[in-house]
Image: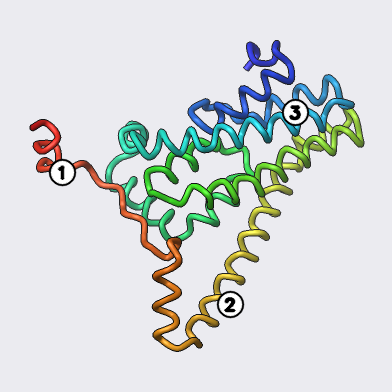
């Protein structure tokens, strides 16, 4: 991270981009460090960090779609991987929203989304909401309070962001439940037609090891 800090705002842009792809250290820490050095530039740093993340998100998604299974297998066992994918299939939107607000490396969500064939446009939408809030909250605090915001960020900002993520996720769950009740009240024919038109209702496939038959077909 010290190497990227030497590049200033460009380093933050690069860090935020690779944070969504493969880099293990979240860009949050570099943003705080650079904003403390120059609080007047904090909002510009937030903009660059957000832009870098949004550029890196589809790249991480593509990596997950093409080789994410092999990457994830290096970090977790098959049974745990299956549980994670089952949870993501059921609560993917909530995971992305909450994860966008926390210091968890965002590559976890981009790679898993690609593995699960989660709609890219949905991933980009939820990432835009969460990451914009995270980058600009930090930037605004430093812009308003200067270097004194650093202690505020380290002491309570993570908890505040996590709480905000939980509130947004809860609001999403309520909206989804209301939508399901409205759909349940519709005639069955209209509901079936609606579900056929909505690609988001299709269930994403679970992650599993490539079968031997598939490997033989590819080798032939």
Expressed as whole percent of the image width and height from the top left, the position of residue 22 reads 48, 28
Closer mark to the observer between disc 3 and disc 1: 1
Q: Which residue is mark 2?
A: 178
Mark 1 secondary-structure assignment? loop
Q: What residue lies at 72% left-to-right and 45% top-to-bottom?
A: 133
Mark 2 secondary-structure assignment? helix
Q: Nearer the viewer, residue 43 or 188?
A: 188
Quadrant of the snapshot with the N terminus: top right
Q: Which residue is mark 3?
A: 32
Closer mark to the observer between disc 3 and disc 2: 2
Q: Quadrant of residue 33?
A: top right
N-term-proximal mark, 3 vs 2: 3
Mark 3 secondary-structure assignment? helix
Expressed as whole percent of the image width and height from the top left, the position of residue 125 reads 60, 50
Cα separation, mark 3 vs mark 1, equals 46 Å
Q: Residues within 10 Å of mark 1 (few under 14, many from 20)?
A: few
N-term-proximal mark, 1 vs 2: 2
Q: What residue lies at 70% left-to-right and 13% top-to-bottom?
A: 7
Q: Which residue is mark 1?
A: 211
Q: Is residue 160 above or below residue 187?
A: above
């Amino acid at each position: 991270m010290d190497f990227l800090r030497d590049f200033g705002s460009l380093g933050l842009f690069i860090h935020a981009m690779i944070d969504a792809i493969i880099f293990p250290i979240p860009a949050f820490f570099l943003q705080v460090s650079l904003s403390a050095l120059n609080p007047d530039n904090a909002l510009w740093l937030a903009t660059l960090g957000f832009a870098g993340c949004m550029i890196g998100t589809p790249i991480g998604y593509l990596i997950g779609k093409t080789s994410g299974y092999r990457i994830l297998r290096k970090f977790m066992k098959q049974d745990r991987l299956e549980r994670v994918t089952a949870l993501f299939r059921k609560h993917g939107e909530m995971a992305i929203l909450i994860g966008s607000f926390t210091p968890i490396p965002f590559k976890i969500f981009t790679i898993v989304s690609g593995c699960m064939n989660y709609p890219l446009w949905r991933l980009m939408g939820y990432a835009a909401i969460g990451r914009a809030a995270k980058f600009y909250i930090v930037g605004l605090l430093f812009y308003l309070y200067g270097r004194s915001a650093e202690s505020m960020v380290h002491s309570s900002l993570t908890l505040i962001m996590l709480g905000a993520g939980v509130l947004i996720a809860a609001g999403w769950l309520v909206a989804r439940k209301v939508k399901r009740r409205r759909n349940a009240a519709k005639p069955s024919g209209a509901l079936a037609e609606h579900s056929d038109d909505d690609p988001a209702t299709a269930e994403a496939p679970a992650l599993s090891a490539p079968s031997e038959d598939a490997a033989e077909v590819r080798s032939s």
